[in-house]
Amino acid sequence: MFDSLSDRLGGVFDKLRGRGALKEQDVRDAMREVRIALLEADVALPVVRRFVDQVTEKAVGQSVLRSVTPGQQVVKIVNDALVEMLGGEDTPGLDLNAAPPVVIMMVGLQGSGKTTSTAKLARLLKEKEGKKAMMASLDVNRPAAQEQLKVLGEQVGVATLPIIPGQQPTEIATRALQAARLQAVDVLLLDTAGRLHVDQQLMDEMKAVAAISAPRETLLVVDSLTGQDAVNVAQSFSGQVDLTGVILTRMDGDARGGAALSMRAVTGKPIKFAGTGEKLDAIEVFHPSRVANRILGMGDIVSIVEKAAATVEAEDAERMAERMAQGKFDMNDLRGQLRQMQKMGGLGVLAGMMPGMKKAKAAMQASGMDDRVLLRMDAIIGSMTPKERANPALLNARRKIRVANGSGTQVQDVNKLLKMHMEMAKAMKQIKKMGGLKGLGALFG
Ligand code: GDP
Ligand code: MG
């Protein structure tokens, strides 16, 4: 249904055969296509602009992995930035850390799915969290609205506040709080009224209810089909009440989920749930990576690049292993190791890694090193000439001063690094004596 972004990017990058770093003009060309993809996914224009600017800055100068094209690499960078912007990998659940009854207030435009989502959440709370929930509809504008919630409540087996005709939203809220206290309810869900468009009366009503009920969660319910208007909706609601999160409904439809990015960018609040159907169990925790995939439509490419990255790492590790088997270990190898360590989470994970690393770790810790040291050591090696890297013995006093100056460190830092390298090289030699890689098993016992 949509033009493939990868086809478009393929065109942009056909002329590029070289490897190396992504150049600014190439990234800009690619971003033009990304921009169209985002607009097609209904991300609001101001959000698209901001996103594209940020990602362009991030992408320029990044190196292109072997075995992927620059276009694919850009897609991966865009995808990662999308996931990040959509909230990263861990999604926060509902915050229920307050004295019961904990109030959850649902706000949003009419038809966005507030009432349905209220019943869905009540069901989740009851079934998954074992909470005693109660729901109350504050929608006095539409005659059938309160009745609708009552019916849904019966379906999910959650109590609703008895309807008293003629009451105002604040009166209903007060009554709901009293009832919830009396009945030892854990969580009270308030389903507020919506209008077709944002208006001040709706906002004032919402604020008054919030003032009375002090909601722990104020969730903005948004239809994922809300396109360019998403920014307006998000801005007006977040300007009036303290939103704590967003629920995106109708993710079962063919919307590509651009509203998610707009909501997140404008409110800065996490998207907590996605509605995925009319049925009352059709709600799930929001998954940024799935939605990023949907927005870009580029899941295949992302996994290609991830695989390529893994392959490169595996190749590096293999090369290392070979050199170790030969008892070789120069500054380039050390640098590779340092970078690997950084990627894997710094010094803390060292112990289990390679033989020799255990000693190195002990040596590093003894001299009071922390993770910043990895970066500094990398800089020191970067200031060495290729010859010095291949043969560190060349580093006499004069050269050490040059390297220290070049890397903004002290000669004693250079010495520490050289000492560490010697220790590790020695360990490598031992491995060789023990019969190369085959002897490694002995080290691990
Ligand atoms: P409200 O006006 O904001 O309270 O919206 P409602 O909860 O009454 O929902 C309006 C319509 O949208 C109803 O027909 C719901 O069944 C439907 N709806 C709500 N959430 C979803 C969803 O996640 N997926 C689909 N397909 N329909 C939904
Ligand atoms: Mg409703």
Image (spheres, rainbow, N blue to C red):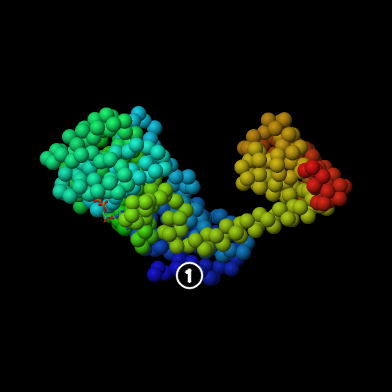
Residue 192: name its quadrant.
top left
Specify the amino acid type for callout 1.
Answer: Asp
Q: Position of residue 194 (x, y in %)?
A: 22, 47
Give the residue at mark 1. Answer: 7
Is 203 placed above or below 276 here?
above
Q: Nearer the viewer, residue 177 or 326?
A: 177
Whether 142 is drawn above or below 213: the answer is: below
Could you tell me which residue is drawn at 74 percent across and 38 percent down? Answer: 358
Q: Residue at x 45, y 68 (%)?
A: 4
User: Which image quarter is the C terminus in?
Assistant: top right
Whether residue 102 is situated above or below residue 65 in the rendered picture: above
Residue 35: x and y in percent read 40, 60
**Residue at x 34%, y 30% (from the top left corner):** 100
Q: Position of residue 268 (x, y in %)?
A: 37, 44
Q: Is residue 391 visible?
A: no
Q: Quadrant of the N terminus?
A: bottom left
In this rendering, position of residue 287 left or right of residue 336: left
